Image (cartoon, rainbow, N blue to C red):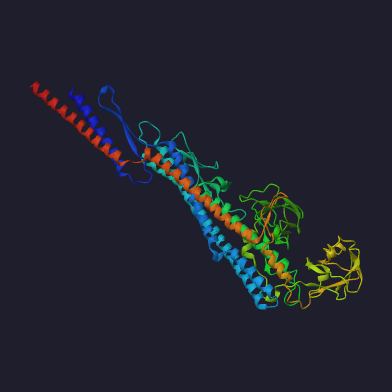
Amino acid sequence: MSDNLLTIGTSGVLASNGLLNTTSNNISNLNTKGYVRQSTEYESSILGLGVGRGTTSRMVNEFALKQLRRDTSNVAFYEQYLAEAGRVDTLFANNANSVGTGMTDLFKQLQTANNDPANNSSRSLVLGSAQTLINKFNTQANLLRDQQAYINEQLSVYVSDANSMVTSIAQLNKEIAGYGLSINTPPPLDLLDKRDEAIRKLAELADIQVLDADNGEKLVFLSTGQSVVLEQGKFNLLSADGDPEISRKIVKMQLDFNTKVTAEIDSNKLGGKIGGLLEFRSQILEPTLNKIGQLALGLGDSFNVQNKLGMDGNGLLGKDLFTLGVYSGMPYRQNTGSGQVLATVEPGEGKNIPPNDFLIEFVAPNQFTMSALDERGAVIAGSAVTQVTGTVAYGFEINMDTSTGAFAAGDKFLFKPLSVAANEIALATTRPEDLALASPVRGDFTLNNLGNARFGDIKVTDTTAPPFATSGVLTGGPFTVRYLGGNDFEIFDGTNTSLGTTGAMAGGLYNNVMAAAGLGTYGFDFNITGVPKPGDTFTIDYNTSGFKDNRNGLALSSLQTADLIRKNAVSTAAADNSSSLTEAYGDVVSFVGQKTAQIRIASESAKSVLAQSEAWYESVSGVNLDEEAANLIRFQQSYAAAAKIIATSQTIFDTLLQAAR
C-alpha cells in the first residue's frame, strides 16, 4: 500500500512541478513578442496509480489567428496609403506652391497689360508671372516625382523585408518538420511561436493566406494566388524591377533557385504595406502628376496658339510663348524591333489631351494603334485609335522613328508624356515685345459711306494662311469690302480684283463675311454691324503701328474661362467633357483631398476591426497575469499535497517495519 502511495505522490509532485514550470514560463514571457500562452495537461495513470503522460501545447485559436493576420494586413495597407497620401495632400494645401494661385496672378498681370498694351513694363510683368507659374509647375511636379523615388526606395526595402520573412518561414518549416509528428516527440513550441511571428510580420507587408501541410509545415500564398512558401523548405522570392519604365518599380515573383524565371503579380490585390504603396501610386500619385502635366500642356498650347494669332510689340506676327517638349515612348522588353516613338503636342490640340497614359502598338508599316490606359494600366474600352505616323491622336502628333532601326509587328511602347510635361514646360522667350496683345488685322469704314454700318468682330483664326505669309504684311491687301445691296457683299484684293461675293445674307446678320464669300481659307473673318447702303465700302489691312490695340490680349485673357482641359479619354457625345484651367486645377486639389479623406476613414475603421481581432486572439493566446497568479497558487498547493502523500507513505512504511520486529 505504501508503495502505491509513494508512486501516486511522486507522480503528483512531478505533475505539479510541470504545471508550475509551464505557469512560470508564461509569466516570464509576458512581454516576449509572438509568445503564445502554453498549457500543460495530464492523463490519469492506469489502475489509478497517479498521474500519467503530460502534454504541453500552445493555446491557439486558428480562426482568431487567421482573422488577426487579415486585419493586420488591412491596417498596414491603409496606414501606408494614408501616410503617402497625406504628404501629397499637404503639398496641395500649401498656397506657396499652388499652380492655381500662379494662374490667377498670370491672368491678373495680363489684364493690367491689356489696359496699357504699349507699355513694355506691363508686358514684362506678364512674362515674369508666366515664369513664376512655370516654377510652380516644376516645383509641384518635382515634389511628386520625389515621392515616386521615395516609393521606389520603400518598395525595395519592403520587398527585401518580405523576402527575409519568407526565407525565415521556410527555414523554420524545415526545422519543425524535422521533429516529426510522433506522439513521443514533444512539439517545438518556441519554433512554432517564431514561425507564427514571422508569418505575422509577412502579413504586415502583404496580404497572405496560410494552409497547413500534412508534415506540420505552413504553406504561405499571396492573396493574388502565388505561393511564396512551399513544402520541404522551398520558397519563392519577390523582386521589384520595372518594365518598361525602369524608374517605376513593380513587384514580381521569382524562383529562389532561378531568378530569371519571374511571374507578374496583381498589385491591386497585394495588400499590406507593399500593396498600400502601390495603390497610392496608381490611384493618387500618378493620376495627380498626369493632371498637373495635362494642365501645363493645355495652358501652354492655348497661349502659344492665341499669341501666334496676334501682333507683337515689334509689329510682327506673334510666336510661341512656351516650349512644351518632345516626348518618347518607352519600349517593352519583349520588343524585337529597334524603332522609336516620338511625339509632340499638335498646336491647338492641347485641349484634346486626356489625363491618361497611353499604349502604342506597331501593327503595320507606317501604322500604329494608340490606346488610353486607366490608373491600373488597362486599356480603356473604346479608346483604341488606329493612326498613320505623322498624324494626330489624343492631341499628339505621333511619329514612328526608324533612324535607330526598323519596327517589328507587335512592338509595344508605354507613352507617358504627362508624367514629365510639368517639368518640360518652359518660357520660349524673355522679351516683353514678343507678347502679342494686338490683332494683326484692322478694318475701317469709308467716311463718305451713306449707311451706318461698321466692322464688328474681326477674328484671326490662322496666321499660317497665305495672307500672312510675310510677317508684318497682309499679303494681297488692303482688302476692300463693298455692299452691293440685297444683303450681298463683294470682296476685292489690293489690285481691285474681285475675290468673291457672299450672295444674299440673312437681313441684318452679316456674320463671317469672308466665309460667306468662299474665302474661309484666308485665316481671318469679320462681321458687319449696322445698316449698310449700296456702294458703301470697307477696308481691311495689316494693323501697322497698332501697338495700343489689345484685341488679342483680350483673347488671351479669355483663356482663363475657356474650356481647355479634357476630362476623360472616352465619353458620350452629350457629356460635359471639358473644363477651364481654374476648374481643372480645383478638380486636382479636390481629387487629392477627397481620396485622402476616404483613406483616413477606412484606416480608422480598419484599426477598430484589428483591435477587436487582437482582443479575441489575446483572450485565448495571450498571457493573463491574474489567471497565471491564481494557477501558481493552485499548483503550489497541489505540489504540497502530493508531497504530503509521499510523507504519508513513508510513515506507513516505517510503521509496518516496526510491527514486523
Q: Where on the picture, by quarter, is residue 559?
A: bottom right
Number of on-image labels: 0
Would residue 628 be found to the left or right of residue 247 on screen?
left
Is residue 352 visible in the rendered image? The answer is yes
Above or below residue 47? Residue 67 is below
Estimate the x, y position of residue 66 in percent, counting from the top left.
45, 39
Residue 169 shows up from this direction: no
Residue 636 point in image, percent of width and height: 23, 36
Residue toward you, 556 or 644: 556
Rendered view: 15 above or below 381 = above
Quarter occupied by the N terminus: top left
Q: Tell me residue 479's x, y (percent).
A: 86, 72
- Res 99 → quadrant: bottom right
- Seen from the viewer's position, the closer of residues 368 and 548 is 548
- Between 272 and 219, the one lying in front of the other is 272
Task: Find the residue positioned furthest to the left.
Answer: 661
Q: Quadrant of the C terminus?
A: top left
Residue 148: x, y in percent?
A: 55, 58
Is residue 65 toward the left or the right of residue 381 in the image? Answer: left
* Residue 306 horizontal side relative to residue 476, left or right: left
Q: Residue at x 36, y 34 (%)?
A: 185
Of residues 466 and 164, the one nearer the viewer is 466
Seen in the image, is 416 located left or right of residue 270? right
